[in-house]
Image: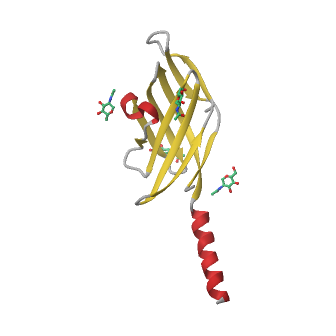
Amino acid sequence: MRFSIFAASSLFAVLAAASSENVTVEDLFIRDNNGIQSAGLTILPANVTCSGNATQLAGYAVASCGDSVYSFAVNGSDSVYSLRIYEAKGVGFGLYGEVTDLPVNCRAGGDGQDDEVCNQVGTIEATISSG
Ligand SMILES: *[C@@H]1O[C@H](CO)[C@@H](O)[C@H](O)[C@H]1NC(C)=O
Ligand SMILES: *[C@@H]1O[C@H](CO)[C@@H](O)[C@H](O)[C@H]1NC(C)=O
Ligand SMILES: *[C@@H]1O[C@H](CO)[C@@H](O)[C@H](O)[C@H]1NC(C)=O
Ligand SMILES: *[C@@H]1O[C@H](CO)[C@@H](O)[C@H](O)[C@H]1NC(C)=O
């Protein structure tokens, strides 16, 4: 009895520990021209590259990162953006996290006065978890 309670709680601890991961984002860019036109980033340590266009990212929609288990979403305006990262772990189960106020530097993109190209200027770390 004692043993099975111990075994059960150990198993739970393993599952709980496995349901959170830290990822780092590099090379984030966002092109914003009265709405997000495109965005891209690399997720480490998996080293997965993600990109999406205006259609794919509209309304904080989730865009896939190639054929990987990761997907992402970008939202915001006027140099203030947020990023969501998702990692599929199995059918109906995955990890999710959001980073707000992304460290970016935006400059004129050249396609009208609202066009801006924003690049990452600081470390972005996200904890993604199952809940
Ligand atoms: C994620 O990073 C936080 C500190 O930023 C740390 O407390 C936590 O243990 C890390 N989680 C994992 C799964 O490495
Ligand atoms: C990520 O993969 C690219 C090739 O796709 C490679 O050039 C780069 O060195 C890798 N970066 C890391 C941090 O592993
Ligand atoms: C966005 O990418 C999708 C998939 O590649 C493509 O079907 C769609 O036409 C693109 N939309 C724009 C606005 O470029
Ligand atoms: C997305 O960004 C817009 C503009 O910054 C903001 O008004 C809206 O609340 C954001 N949506 C979500 C779901 O955070």
Q: Residue 102 occupies which quadrant of the picture? A: top right
- Give the residue displayed 59% in from the left and 75% down from the top: 11
Q: Position of residue 31 (x, y in %)?
A: 48, 24
Q: Position of residue 38 (x, y in %)?
A: 43, 28
- Give the residue displayed 59% in from the left and 57% down from the top: 20
Position above or below: 16 against 55: below
- Give the residue displayed 61% in from the left and 86% down from the top: 4
Q: Residue furthest bottom?
A: 1
Q: Nearer the viewer, residue 118 or 46?
A: 118
Q: Quadrant of ligand 3?
A: top left
Q: Nearer the viewer, residue 39 or 1?
A: 1
Q: Quadrant of the C terminus?
A: bottom right
Q: Quadrant of the N terminus?
A: bottom right
Q: Position of residue 125 (x, y in %)?
A: 62, 44
- Give the residue displayed 67% in from the left and 88% down from the top: 2
Position above or below: 19 against 32: below
Q: Nearer the viewer, residue 35 or 53?
A: 35
Q: Residue 49 occupies which quadrant of the picture? A: top left
Give the total of numbered labels: 0
